Image: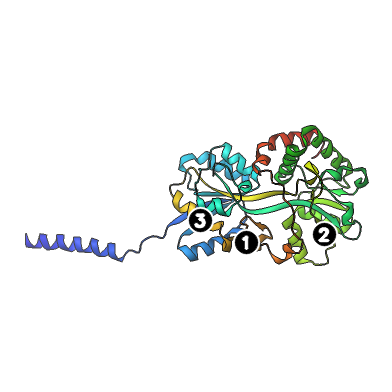
Amino acid sequence: MKLRSLMCLFVLLSVVGCGRNEAPQSPELVVYSSRIEQLIKPIFDQFTEETGVRIRYVTDSAGPLLARLNAEGANSPADLLITVDVGNLWQATEMNLLAPIDSAVLAENVPASLRDDQGRWFGMSVRARTIVYARDRVKPEELSTYEALADEKWSGRLCLRTSKKVYNQSLVATMMSANGEAETESIVAGWVKNLAVAPFSSDDKVIEAIAAGQCDVGLVNSYYLARQQAANPDLGVELFWANQQGEGAQGRGVHVNICGVGVTQASDKKALAQQLLEWLSGPEAQLAIANLNQEFPVNPASEPTPLIKEWGAFKADNVPVVEAGRLQADAIRLMDRAGYR
């Protein structure tokens, strides 16, 4: 009996001892991101360093990530979704993939026009889609609005990215909101008529075509130009802020879109996920995000990079970006009718 008692005591002490020696596991969040690794890893590493929370992430295009989240349902390991363009965020909400978050911090840091009114997604960074032009062949005073690029004077001088890219779909969707469907279709048909070459696969190629003299004007997201100007100050392609003057649609401001983030419905760590989301909206993280991709911060307390500041301030279209998502399917059909491929 004594030996049996001693053995039991030894086992008990061993179990307790093992428990004491085991280090507690660090908390972890899983992020599905259509933003590439080089633009998210430094941010996540900074969050981990500050909080001890580890971030595991999966990167892919928006479409496959949304399909994956939908297929996984309540069993998805993802706690947050990061994706570019509000059209993709709109689809995520339509598929009921994102959970509403009520946060005074996010309400303070993210302007209302750059977040979902039910708190299901929030802007993480802002990009402006505007006009770029050849410095030696176009004078800034010749430019004015997106709509004016349909004028005959730009015949054979315009370059565009393919209509299949969500960035152009969102731009046309907001034009529909401002100008109505019939007028927007006429404008887009005018763009097509003015094309110098067939639409390109990327904004970078649009800029390169202007620099090479294939065309004189184009439409791109601002960060593409910033990155090329940083790499080559003698690029010869400049930026023009569209729709700054006039009444109504003519002076409504530059089309802006976002890279946004939301907490997934499937997450069982919503409080921790909200902590990361709030941290991403703070001034320090906003500065880091802006520097990584030459984008604009969503937080009004943060400033853009010096290169972007040189472009000067602009008036942004204050139509809630969610409109781009709501009208996106209609915009795709409109572009197809107008012959924009």
Query: Number of numbered discs present?
Result: 3
Left or right of residue 332: residue 95: left
Gap between marks 1 and 3, in whole Å?
A: 18 Å
Q: x%, y% of residue 280? A: 55, 57
Viewer-nearest residue: 126 or 12: 126
Q: Is residue 22 above or below residue 186?
A: below
Locate the C terminus and report the quarter of the image it occupies: top right
Report crowding for label 2: few under 14, some 14 to 19, many 20 or more residues within 10 A (C-alpha): many
**Residue hosting label 3:** 276
Could you tell me which residue is drawn at 47 percent across and 47 percent down? 77
Residue kind at label 1, given as amino acid type: Ser
Q: Earlier in the sequence, mark 2 or mark 3?
A: 2
> Residue at position x 76%, y 66% from top?
231
Q: Quadrant of residue 327?
A: top right
SS at mark 2 in the image: strand
Residue 148 image-quadrant placement: top right
Q: Earlier in the sequence, mark 1 or mark 3?
A: 3
Q: Is residue 63 visible?
A: no
Mark 1 or mark 2, which is nearer the start of the sequence? 2
| CB under 8 Å between discs 1 and 3 | no
Q: Amino acid at mark 3?
A: Leu
Q: Is residue 239 left or right of residue 102?
A: right
Q: Which mark is residue 238?
A: 2
Choose between 26 and 117: the one closer to the eye: 117
Could you say whether the residue bearing mark 3 is in a helix, strand or loop?
A: helix
Give the CA distance from mark 2 to mark 3: 36 Å
**Tag 2 and tag 3, C-beta contact below 8 Å:** no
User: Which mark identifies residue 302?
Assistant: 1
Q: Position of residue 84 (x, y in %)?
A: 64, 49
